[in-house]
Image (cartoon, rainbow, N blue to C red):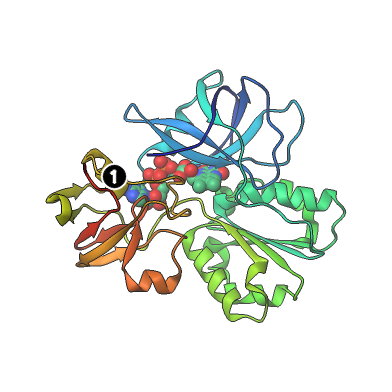
């Protein structure tokens, strides 16, 4: 059961590889580009095994009237196939996209900014840097971290714009960036905008929470729900309905529940809104909480989980849902 999203037709414009495994794609909406703020994303209806699914992509750069939307898609090898579908598009292909929406809004109420991007997490961050610089903000610094320069798009565009204010780290050359240094780059006015892989996000959040500055000055967006364990099949039981379901590794719990006709309310499908939470009655193995809705202590209690992203590794789970069959 899902609410929201007005879809419209769009045509694919220019496609260009901007890094190893990153394709920049222009999208021309049928009714013209909507005004959007930096940090926005659009949802795209992708086909996976001929079944429509939704994937989100951040808009690269700032809004410009009469210009297409630009996105950059990283091709993932370990995946259900959304990014591969995006790479299979050609100039002139037709698809359905949503209006832009923004859950990662840049606030202009500070005089000091640190932008942190890990890999493909640069896509919402790039427009933020452009806009802050365009507004004459002098105190904008960026950390752009990745595994190798050839895998990181937009390096020269950023260097041209930011000069010495950008720090690049290629872990194949320099090793992993020492995230504890982030605090030294900040003061009490600094707002951090962060987007990157889960391990980087968790490390920065931990450092920030242990540091001397306001928690609310760290703002972030997640791209996905990669967990601490590789996805694997597991058994899901719901005693209320006398049900046993095998959740396959390429399916989410939410999909498995829907296929078994157990209705679960949901919205974001990214582990952010918490609408799809279910009660955990019993489990074995590890619950791989992949959401950003529950706090770390709630996750530690293992009493609830978000069915859209979280899974079980090396065990099984017994749950209850709010749904009651008539
Ligand atoms: C707001 C937002 C903005 C985004 N912007 C961008 C962007 O600018 N560029 C970009 O490339 N991507 C972006 N993404 C990510 C994008 O929406 C897709 O998730 C991405 O392209 C991968 O899709 P996929 O189907 O190829 O991979 P998926 O199958 O969705 O796999 C993604 C991750 O989930 C894990 N996974 C695989 N199977 C399962 C399963 N059964 N259950 C749970 N997890 C599983 C994988 O290990 C992998 O780490 C954004 C996402 C969000 C939410």
The answer to which of 102 and 48 lies nearer the viewer is 102
Q: Residue at x 55, y 18 (%)?
A: 92
Point out the residue furthest to the left here: 242
The answer to which of 118 and 258 lies nearer the viewer is 258
Residue 84's image quarter? top left
Q: Please determine whether, in this image, residue 87 is positioned above or below residue 178.
A: above
Q: Position of residue 18 (x, y in %)?
A: 60, 39
Q: Position of residue 182 (x, y in %)?
A: 65, 72
Pick the quarter of the image with the N terminus.
Answer: top left
Q: Secondary structure at mark 1?
A: loop
Q: Residue at x 61, y 41 (%)?
A: 101
Residue 19 appears in the picture as rendered: no
Question: Which residue, given by chain and number where applicable, does mark 1 sit on?
Answer: 251
Mark 1 vs ligand 1: CB under 8 Å? yes
Q: Position of residue 226 (x, y in %)?
A: 40, 55
Residue 205's image quarter? bottom right
Q: Please determine whether, in this image, residue 256 is positioned above or below residue 107.
A: above
Q: Position of residue 317 (x, y in %)?
A: 21, 60
- For label 1, the crowd category at 10 Å Cα-Cα, with few meaning under 14, some 14 to 19 and many 20 or more, is some
Q: Please determine whether, in this image, residue 244 is positioned above or below residue 87.
A: below
Residue 74 appears in the picture as rendered: yes
């Amino acid at each position: 059961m899902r609410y929201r999203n007005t879809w419209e037709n769009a045509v694919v414009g220019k496609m260009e590889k901007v890094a190893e495994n990153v394709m920049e794609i222009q999208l021309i909406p049928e009714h013209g580009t909507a005004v959007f703020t930096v940090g926005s994303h659009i949802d795209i209806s992708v086909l996976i095994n001929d079944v429509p699914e939704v994937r989100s992509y951040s808009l690269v750069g700032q809004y410009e009237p009469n210009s297409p939307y630009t996105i950059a898609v990283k091709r993932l090898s370990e995946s259900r196939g959304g990014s591969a579908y995006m790479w299979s598009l050609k100039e002139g292909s037709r698809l359905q996209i949503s209006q832009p929406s923004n859950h990662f809004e840049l606030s202009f109420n500070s005089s000091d900014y640190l932008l942190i991007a890990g890999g493909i997490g640069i896509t919402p961050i790039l427009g933020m840097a452009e806009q802050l610089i365009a507004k004459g903000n002098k105190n904008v610094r960026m950390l752009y971290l990745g595994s190798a320069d050839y895998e990181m798009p937009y390096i020269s565009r950023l260097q041209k714009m930011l000069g010495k204010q950008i720090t690049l780290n290629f872990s194949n050359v320099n090793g992993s960036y020492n995230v504890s240094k982030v605090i030294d780059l900040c003061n009490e006015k600094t707002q951090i905008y962060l987007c990157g892989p889960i391990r980087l996000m968790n490390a920065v959040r931990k450092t920030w929470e242990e540091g001397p500055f306001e928690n609310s000055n760290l703002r972030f967006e997640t791209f996905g729900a990669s967990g601490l364990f590789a996805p694997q099949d597991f058994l899901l039981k719901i005693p209320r309905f006398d049900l046993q379901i095998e959740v396959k590794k390429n399916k989410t719990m939410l999909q498995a529940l829907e296929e078994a006709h157990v209705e679960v309310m949901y919205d974001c499908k990214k582990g952010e809104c918490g609408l799809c939470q279910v009660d955990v009655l019993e489990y074995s193995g590890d619950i791989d909480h992949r959401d950003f809705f529950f706090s770390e202590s709630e996750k530690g209690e293992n009493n609830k989980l978000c069915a859209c992203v979280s899974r079980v590794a090396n065990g099984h789970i017994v749950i209850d849902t709010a749904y009651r069959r008539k």
